[in-house]
Image (cartoon, rainbow, N blue to C red):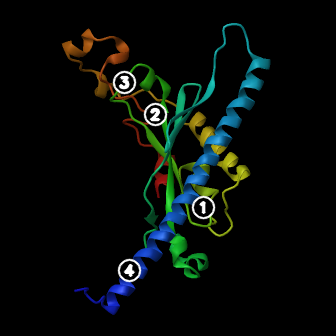
Amino acid sequence: MTKKILPENKELFKEIIRKSSMKQEVFNASQEAFGLFKTVSGQIAQEYAKTAAKKKKKGDNIPLEIEEHGPFEFSLKFGGDILFFLMHSNIFEIPRDHNVMRSTYIKEDKDRSYCGIIHIYNFLSDSFKYNRVNDLGYLIGRVLINKEQHYFIEGKSELGFLYKNFRGSIITPESVDKIITAAMRYTIGFDLLTPPYDNVKLISVEEMKNTLDSIGFKTGKRLGFKFYQDEEEDD
């Protein structure tokens, strides 16, 4: 005997289909945007190679290289730094207390508050070259993209302050170029600082037996320091 479907169950099924379809739409838009980030990063690497070849001095080897690590991750290496771009496979809703949720753009269509996320992390290239597993990376920005490929950015310095117009900001090759360039500029200005003396004055015999690059010191650009500028940017 076939069980009769309750009316409320039919509504539930419709909502499952509607919401799942919407999230798939957001995922597709985010995946397309992530592909654009990879493409533009590759173009930047090619442009850099042409410029570097003209200005290269004897013995110079300062590459700018892109490397894919899977469908949701790639890296851009330049100088002594690496930027990792990671797209999350899940879709997130913007928190209700976020400033963006008060915009008319969201109020007109609540589904616009569902976003895919691309994280941008900065690591030292030597951390991977010498397998220093204790070294630290920093999230310098994250790009939130909705079903319409509108985006806003949360992050440090110009990354966080220049891209907050959710309605007016749309993922294009030009906008992606600006985001990547801003991330690179911030990274270049975000220098490695000497760690506090008290943090490194003790070392074990086991650590000393290893080569210098394998010592278990944590290396990070702001490890052990607190700067007024960083405090302002975190607000």
Q: Element at badge 3?
A: loop
Residue at the (72%, 30%) spot, across then down: 46
Residue lying farthest right? 54
Ranked by sequence position, the earlier of labels 3 and 1 is 3
Could you tell me if residue 141 is visible in this image?
yes
Distance Cα–Cα, label 2 vs label 3: 14 Å
Q: Nearer the viewer, mark 4 or mark 3?
A: 4
Dot 1 or dot 4, earlier in sequence: 4
- In percent of width and height, residue 21 lies at 49, 70
Instruction: State which tag comes first along the sequence, 4 or 3.
Output: 4
Residue 13: image tag: 4
Q: Which amino acid does label 2 sit on?
A: Lys
The residue under label 3 is which amino acid type? Arg
Mark with earlier residue (2, 1): 1
Cα distance in 3D space between marks 3 and 1: 35 Å
Front one among 120 and 229: 120
- Vertical placement of residue 11 versus 139, above or below: below
Please determine whether, in this image, residue 15 is positioned above or below residue 116: below
From the viewer's perspective, is 95 left or right of 161?
left
Q: Tell me the element at label 1.
A: strand
Q: Are marks 2 and 1 in contact (CB under 8 Å)?
A: no
Viewer-nearest of labels 1 and 4? Answer: 4
C-alpha separation, residue under disc 1 versus residue under disc 4: 30 Å
**Amino acid type, label 4:** Phe
Provide the residue designation for mark 3.
132
